[in-house]
Image (tube, rainbow, N blue to C red):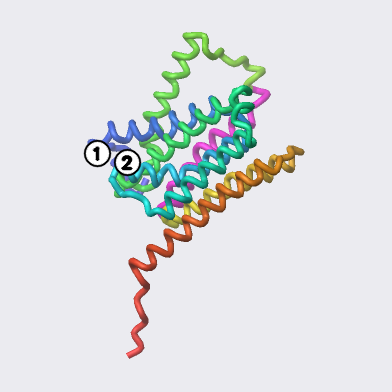
Amino acid sequence: MGGRGRRALAYDGRLALAATLGCFGFAGYNLFTFAGMQYTAPEHAAIITALQAPLTALAHWAWRGARPARFTLGCVALAFAGVVLVVTKGDPAAALAAGSLWGDALVLLGSASWVVYVLGVVKFAGWSPLRYTALTCLPASFAIALVAIAATGLGVVGVPRAATLAAVGWQIAFLTFLSALVGVLCWNAGIRALGPLNAVLLGNLIPVVTFAIRIAQGHRFDGTEIAGAALVIGALAANNLYVRRALRAQHPPAKPDIS
């Protein structure tokens, strides 16, 4: 962990903050998302996850008072409108009656939790991605265990049988090692290496890949869903380009010295 040996496992007086952020990023994101997935469709979860960029802009506004530009706010509004089109298929009453909006709301809470975790990276600038991931994941694991024990005791969930675990063994292994471990490590490392703008832009591929997989599985989307997804991705990409242009205007590249 950054070549510091055992010292890399020390919280340096920031245990409370690391635990809080870990509970948002791992416990909050995973519990809310997986609970929501019981009531909604994978493509809904993917398109809602794409809202993390607009949610981050709004969080910066609320947290630091940094009001986004009008263009950005317009893109945020369009992105949310596109999500509404996807999750309701243009008929909010029918979606509400079907109960899927409850699952969508839980997934949105999960995405907001992940935004809090990502924003917390700046509080640990001296930590490597591996150290930040490990020391925020550890307390979150205890929190998830406590929630699971409480839910089991209250009868909300049951203890899975050995045959059930064996039937979904490879799926659990995938989520544990590739999604939770490798995925988070790569994400934290990618943010540091590529910068937030590039990370967010690549994050827009999540709904694209999800829709492609669903189509390959035989699912057919109607025009409203396709239009909503295109609106979300287009709004996020447009804002990304706008922010890049604004940053270049503020910090133009140095002219080469030809003297």
Callout 1: SS? loop
Sequence-earlier tag: 2 or 1: 1
Q: Which range is magenta? A: 166-192
Determine the residue positioned at 44% across, 21% down: 145
Q: Nearer the viewer, residue 186 or 104?
A: 104
Quarter of the rendering occupied by the C terminus = bottom left
Q: Residue 26: image x %, image y %? A: 44, 33
Q: Position of residue 182 (x, y in %)?
A: 51, 42
Instruction: Tell me which amino acid carries mark 1.
Output: Asp
- Give the prevailing secondary structure in the magenta stretch: helix
In the rendered structure, the answer to whether residue 166 lies left or right of residue 82 reads: right
Asked if residue 134 lies in the magenta stretch, the reply is: no
Q: Percent position (x, y) of residue 4?
A: 31, 46
Which residue matches tag 2? 62
* Quadrant showing the N terminus: top left
Closer to the eye: label 2 or 1: 2
Magenta span includes 187: yes
Label of residue 12 in the image: 1
For residue 63, what is the image quadrant? top left
Say above or below: 144 vs 179.
above
